[in-house]
Amino acid sequence: MSRIVSRPAIIRALLKKELKAYSRDKVYLFLTLLVLIAIPLTYKFMPSKVNETITLAVSPSVSSMVEDAKDSLKAMGATDAQLAELDNADLSQEQEGLLLIEFDNEEDMQSVVEGKLEAWRAEDGALILRDPETDQDKPPNAEKLGLDIGIAFPKDFISNVAAGKSGVAVTVYSDANVPEEIQGAMTSFVREAAYQLAGKQLPVTMADDASIVLGTDRAGDQVSLKDKLRPMLIFMVLLMETFSMASLVSTEVLQRTVTAVLVTPAKTSDFLIAKTIFGTAMSMGQGLFVLLLVGGLTAGNWSLVLATLLMGSMMFTGIALFVGSSGKDFMGQLFYSMLFMIPLLIPSFSVLFPGTAASWVRVIPTYPIIDTLVGAFNYSMTWSDAAGSLAYAAVWVVALFGAGLFTLKRKVKSL
Amino acid sequence: MTVPAINVEGLRFSYGDLEAVKGISFDVQPGEILGFLGPNGAGKSTTIKMLTGQITPKGGKAQVLGIDISADDADLQAQIGVCFEEKNLYLNMSAKENLDFYASLFGIKEPETMEILRRVGLAERAKDRVHTFSKGMRQRMMISRAFVNKPKVLFLDEPTDGLDPVTSASIRKTIREEADRGAAVLLTTHDMFEADELSDRIAFLNDGEIVAIDTAENLKLKYGTRSVKVRLRDGAGVREEHIELASDGSSARLAELAASPDLLTIHTEEATLEKIFIELTGRGLAG
Ligand SMILES: Nc1ncnc2c1ncn2[C@@H]1O[C@H](COP(=O)(O)OP(=O)(O)O)[C@@H](O)[C@H]1O
Ligand SMILES: [Mg+2]
């Protein structure tokens, strides 16, 4: 006897049912509306500039570095006019939220950062150092500076960078009381600041906690907070959709409707394929909607953004299927959701501080998704740059679906 | 001889260390209703779960419509109908949508949904969502869903559990119609009246084992003892005496009591399936 019903027909039937279940569940509808309204609104009202001024100490003074580099710059073909422009650059004024405090002496700067010396800034911009141990008067009409971080450049920094030398080390001092994560973030910030000082955007890698070494990595443009958060918003959409999808699977497991489906010619794989198509389509749809609203398709590498969104939708659906078929009851369900969601969220924070992700963060399955989204959005990442990340994500997608199929089969047998 | 619709040999299942089904054998012919009668925990549902492919047997063999159940065969699944113990309906969908969806899984293009709903008395509620249905209505939905694909074999796990007598009777009528149509029916129950009324044959299941399997008539003849209960006035109260009809001196004692001036009433006591069950297993069907 031949099989009277084809698999595509079964999957179509399951999809139709999926759509009904989704459209009739208040929780799913609420979550969907929340995503579609709240996230674009958050984006709209987010400041496009960071207003807070970051105070940063450097040594030696930029002008002395420029002075020292003049000869080598000249030798490399810099014109007198260009050199004069460097002389006239006023770095002591606040620019783009960055206040630069220059130290002539690396040891002084280190002492201030470590809290052994106080630094005061007079109205005319002059720097006054005071030893808090002595009974020396506080300088009048001066503002005390909070310096948690200082960068010491080598004397020949500019000429080395200009000559394209690699392995140019910059030492970053930070107060030991500053938490490690903040230190990491600051280091990343310092790195971006270093590009600006060098007048070039050079690739860098971090050598250790205390110093950064210029080498090869993705170039980091200065990107506004608002732009940085775009990929994170997309990530949030996918995450919210994951909760809906997980509950679409778990209700079938908990109410045991899945067993009714599986005693018919429909197989566990048909059930999962239908859920996957549905979940991926829902995530993709919502992701696209939000993308359009935040202008994600006009900026950066849009085809790569779309491909990554698809990969991300599939990955999160895979996670949802796995989580949704894991819990035995509602509480178990919640427990598994949290168990998986929290670690999967971690990589999205690396968006705020690009390049700071520790190696263990890079291993998390969602890291390549967010990393590629960030790259494609804001750093003109190309398809070949992203190939490795996407391949790594694809491996996870396959593994998650395998795990989902296995868990669901086991779960159904224990009902 | 025709191929049995269900053929089971030495089927076993255990949940961890707990042996739920301990090697049972039976068959069901097309058009026959076999009633699985046993208390809660006897292994009735576990047997149905194995035969419908929900769980994999730990031993023994079974064929349904001549196809080995371990084959996970879509052709076989297309020809069976299952009524589960839990009422696993899509609560957010209407009665009609539930049945239409189920029919589409069998590739049925024009399901006779309304006709099926009419048979279980739910035609007027076809458009209402199942979450608005009473327990009895949901149970009728469960039964009707099992009929959607006109199955050759029906597995019905406690189809009338917890229903009022009127609803139970109407559901039994539809089950009988299915058997008359030619379907083999394996039905579980812990209700001896249901087993007695509906089944062509009855299997007594206790603690994972079939302790007896035969027609109700034969079981009663083989194991039951016919007896008479005589009630007599005893001073201010009432006294009862049971007389087993086949035992020595029973007729003399009965004649003596019948002539007594204290005689109130005489009742014949037919052996019930429950009594036989107790006789065979030392336990009742409840609990
Ligand atoms: N999922 C399960 N896990 C562990 N034990 C189970 C499970 N389902 C049933 N059992 C046990 O197996 C035995 C048979 O159960 P079951 O087949 O449901 O009996 P019945 O349907 O006759 O009431 C019982 O002792 C029951 O407690
Ligand atoms: Mg049962």
Image (tube, rainbow, N blue to C red):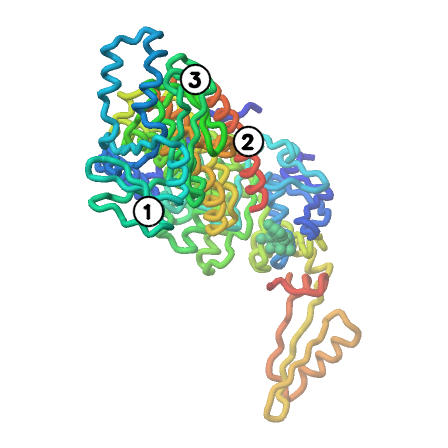
Q: Nearer the viewer, residue A106 or A332?
A: A106
Q: Which residue is most to the bottom?
A: B235
Q: Within 10 Å of the Cα at label 3, are there few (<14), some (14-19), or many (20+) other Cα atoms?
A: some
Looking at the image, is mark 2 or mark 3 nearer the viewer? 3
Q: Three-letter amino acid code at disc 2?
A: Gly
Residue B154 visible somewhere in the drawing: yes
Q: Which mark is residue A117?
A: none
Chain letter of the residue beneath label 2 in the structure image: A
Q: What amino acid type should be assigned to the residue bearing mark 3?
A: Asp
| Visible residue check, residue A12 | no
Disc 3 is attached to a residue of which chain? A
- The N terminus of chain A is located in which quarter? top right
Q: Using the image, determine if residue A375 lies above or below residue A364.
A: above
Q: Residue at x 72, y 49 (%)?
A: B22
Give the tally of numbered discs: 3
Question: On what subunit does the disc labeled 1 rest?
Answer: B
**How far from the left and from the top, in percent, is residue A351?**
37, 32
Q: Could you give the CA–CA distance between mark 3 and mark 1, rounded to whole angstroms?
A: 55 Å
Q: CA distance from mark 2 to mark 1?
A: 38 Å
Would residue A126 be found to the left or right of residue B92 on screen?
left
Q: Which residue is mark 1?
A: B128
Q: Residue at x 35, y 49 (%)?
A: A132
- Look at the picture and state if A391 lies above or below B19: above
Q: Nearer the viewer, residue B144 or B175?
A: B144
Residue B17 against residue B54 in the figure, above or below: below
